[in-house]
Image (tube, rainbow, N blue to C red):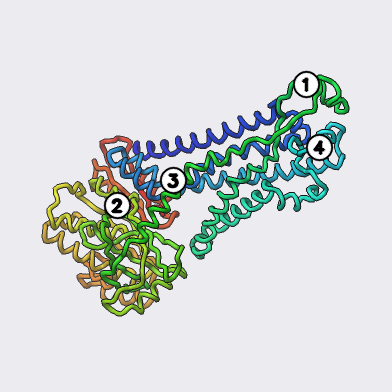
Amino acid sequence: CNHCVMETLFWLCLQFVWMAINIFLFVYFYFFYDLGPQFFYTRHLLGSALPWARAPAAVLNFNCMLILLPVCRNLLSLLRGSFVRCSRTMRKQLDKNLTFHKLVAYMIALMTAVHTIAHLFNLERYNNSRQGLDDELSTALSDLADTENTTYLNPVRGADDRIPTYFAFTTIAGLTGVVITLALILIITSSMEVIRRSYFEVFWYTHHLFIIFFAGLVFHGAGRIVRSQQRTNPPHNTTFCKDHPDDWGQIPECPIPQFAGGFPQTWMYVIGPMVIYLCERLVRFIRYMQRVQYKKIVMRPSKVLELQLIKNGFKMEVGQYVFVNCPAISQLEWHPFTMTSAPEEDFFSVHIRSAGDWTDKLIEIMKKVPEGAEGPKLGVDGPFGTASEDVFDYEVSMLIGAGIGVTPFASILKSIWYKFKDSDPKLRTRKIYFYWLCRETHAFEWFADLLQVLEKEMEERGMGDFLTYKLYLTGWDQSHATHVMVHFDKDTDVVTGLKQKTHYGRPIWDKEFEQVRKENPTSIVGTFLCGPEALGKVLEKKCAKYSDVDPRKTRFYFNKENF
């Protein structure tokens, strides 16, 4: 569809601009160090490793300036709010914040590898020149030093410096370089999908090594190991003097060349984003200090905990999420949860599934809280916007949830119920298709009550066609299948108690999209997913496949939750 193409093109344009800036910086600084006359003698010592070390450094500065911005969630919410009256395309780009964060991280990892390898070659060349293993000019350049030892070219000064490990751990550039590289390796390896999903705490704690990473980054350039030739009076004629090192300081054409390290620049790139991020953390801390009260603690089937909470001044929209912290478990860990309550309610709620050490501990603590008693202290940061906020901008919506991924749609369906109850004239939505995929029957139970209320409400108002929902059970055993067959002729479903019977297996998405297109021949259909990445790729392709080229006919817009 035209809209899908526009969104894709916009995203590709953003990536193109970002990549073009990276390429420009790399090429510009590569030739700056490869051709610059002030680096003539430096290049003689180091060869091509000099530009290969400095060009990635420029790209690193640019990307380290960007890496924190996509994770400033309060900033993103502020921007999202300012784009309310703009096109959906602009707002949807903000939903790709984590994708962009990863792209920038990959670039940082690649440039760090190139920068480090090039400097290892540089260190080897510095060592060889200091030991007189290279030509006469290299030896003369390495021997340069004044009485205060400040105008040297070769940073390997003493005998101990010739040992690479000694140089790495006793110089500012070496020590900070080692610290930065180790921190980056730990951050990247712990960010792998398998670790992030199975050992979230490992991912969480190692990601906070970014503090050490940025601290080392700011001081890394202070070592000034890459040095350039300074102007002298009379000037040093490199074209002539490079062949007569023995005459340096003896004849007017060849005064002793003077060298100095470049002024550190990294801090100028990162200071702005660091200040913005510090403000972000300050806002989070203020929110953490605000008191959160419990209205209700409910243990749902399938190890799902429902928390109904109250916080002064808290305002939410459908589909938004919050970060929750429980100091009794960890002072530092914050976990995102989509809210399942509606904006019309006097509380906000989250449903938390057992999915790791932190959630298991929280569920165990809540189980021990006496009924009606106040639970442990909680910190709540948010709410933050997601793609599901836009659900009421569409006349027709397809909501697809997988497992606990149904939570944003609980908020949406509840809000719709309140809007119908209050006869809200602003409600544009006239049709909703809801799909929920689950592996086990118990998972349906906590959500079935809401669907029953909606089912009854729509029938009473003569709007039975407003909500079409299909529940898919993707895992079952023989005893369950036998039970279903025995009670197949009942009016209500044996699993959920709803009039709509549960489907077994996975949806045939081609059939579902074809049906929606047939029933809404001239509508814009918002397709919302909260579920796995693999399903997202399938649905995105279906949206493109079943969108008509004619803008007057059915078009599907794909939206996915990102945390």
The image shows residue 163 at horizontal and vertical percentages of 79, 50
Quadrant (top left/top right/bottom left/bottom right) for the N terminus: top left
Q: Is residue 506 visible?
A: no
Rendered location of residue 524, percent (x, y): 27, 43
Q: Earlier in the sequence, mark 1 or mark 4?
A: 4
- Note whether residue 412 is visible: yes
539 above or below 28? below
Q: How far across and down, in percent of the image, does residue 2 sit?
A: 34, 36
Quick check: marks 3 and 4 in contact, CB under 8 Å? no
| Residue on which disc 3 sits | 276
Q: Is residue 22 above or below residue 176?
A: above
Which of disc 4 and disc 3 is earlier in sequence? Answer: 4
Badge 1 amino acid: Asn
**Above or below 547: residue 478:** below
Residues at marks 3 and 4, CA–CA distance in whole angstroms: 44 Å
- Circle 2 packing at 10 Å, graded few (<14), some (14-19), many (20+), is many
Q: Contact, CB < 8 Å: mark 2 with mark 3?
A: no
Q: Residue at x 78, y 23 (%)?
A: 238
Is residue 417 rendered to the left or right of residue 129?
A: left
Which is nearer the N-term, disc 2 or disc 4? 4
Judging by the rendered image, the residue that carries numbered circle 4 is 142
Which residue is at a point 23% across and 56% down the rendered structure image?
A: 343
Q: Amino acid at mark 4?
A: Ser
Q: Is 456 placed left or right of 219 in the picture?
A: left
The mark nearer the N terminus, 2 or 3, is 3
Name the residue that disc number 2 marks: 398
